[in-house]
Image (cartoon, rainbow, N blue to C red):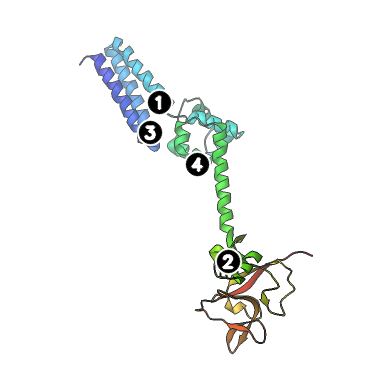
Amino acid sequence: MNTIGWIVNLENAILLALIQYSAMEAECKIFDFLKVVHALCLLLTEQIYYVLPTNAKIFSIVVIKITIIFGSMTKIGANIKKIRTTKGLSQQAFAELFALTRGNISSYEENRAEPRIETVIQIANYFCIPLNQFITETLSIHEILKYKGDKLIEDENHIINIHLRQVPFINDAIYMKCCYQELSFNDWPSFPKLILPEVNHHHMLALSFNPNIAHHESLPHYQMNDVLIFEEVTRQNIHLCHHKIGLFISDREIMIGRYEIKEEKMELVLNDFKSEKFEFNSSQQFWKLFALYQHVK
């Protein structure tokens, strides 16, 4: 094979290797690979120059092509400058964020050097930018702001979801449907939901107060549509129920009473004639008043 053919084959082999390596998306190794290829080409060019001066010129074209590919495959320098200007940071201020020097940043932005892989990952993570896009795409100002904003919104929503919960709500409409047996008082999935702060791990239930609901005579003077929030009575909180306001629910019945201990057993008392004995294994539901959303007079 003549020298020109050998050089052309080398060019094709290197270009193919670059394409294949890029397709593997091996961000953490691609810089080292490219630098080795680039250094190899420079070394071969120097050797050919002394032996075959004419062909060295031809091979220089290969090196130029490789250099162009090397520069075009990464957009790190341009993106660093775009991020820095978008955030209003000087080169010195940007450098201090990542324990670098102003000279480092200047050389990156002018494509005179590439940052270490660790630094690339650190910058991308700091500004919440996907690593692949930070390396291979020229980012716009909108994208730079969007990535940071998306993360903040995602974090904020995550915090909100942690501290809020949906609670089944028996409002007047649901109460009437249950009274007419269109629904059951235990048919929670059909109830509307109130969004309330997350305060414990017990089941919660909200009830819009209606004077037509059977209730204990000593009940505080709640107004129509005051919202009573109840938590389910469990082994963890039953010791807190004595003399407290509670709610009893079965499929067709609802009442608001007061918990009393009689003969060493907890009962929810409505009046002298009506009470419900609490049992852990009962299918009926017992609740303890937890909070009150009351209208201000």
Residue with the most extreme top position: 54
Q: Is residue 92 above or below residue 211?
A: above
| Dot in front, 1 or 2 | 2
Q: Which residue is mark 2?
A: 200
**Which residue is drawn at the image coordinates 55% and 43% (left, top)?**
150
Residue to which mark 1 is pinned: 70
Q: Which mark is residue 130?
A: none
10 Å crowding of disc 3: few (<14), some (14-19), many (20+): some
Q: Residue furthest bottom?
A: 263
Q: State the residue in front, 108 or 173.
A: 173
**Left or right: where 197 falls relative to 99:** right
The amino acid sitting under disc 1 is Phe
- Mark closer to the chain start, 3 or 2: 3
Quadrant (top left, top right, bottom left, bottom right) of the C terminus = bottom right
**Residue 223, image x and y in percent?**
74, 69
Left or right, 165 with reference to 74: right
Tag 4: amino acid: Asn
Measured as percent of width and height from the top left, residue 11 is found at 30, 21
* Element at label 2: loop
Q: Nearest the camera: 294 or 119?
A: 294
Residue 30's label in the rendered image is 3
For label 1, the crowd category at 10 Å Cα-Cα, with few meaning under 14, some 14 to 19 and many 20 or more, is some
- Residue 84 coordinates in the image, percent (x, y): 57, 33
In the picture, residue 135 is in which quadrant? top left
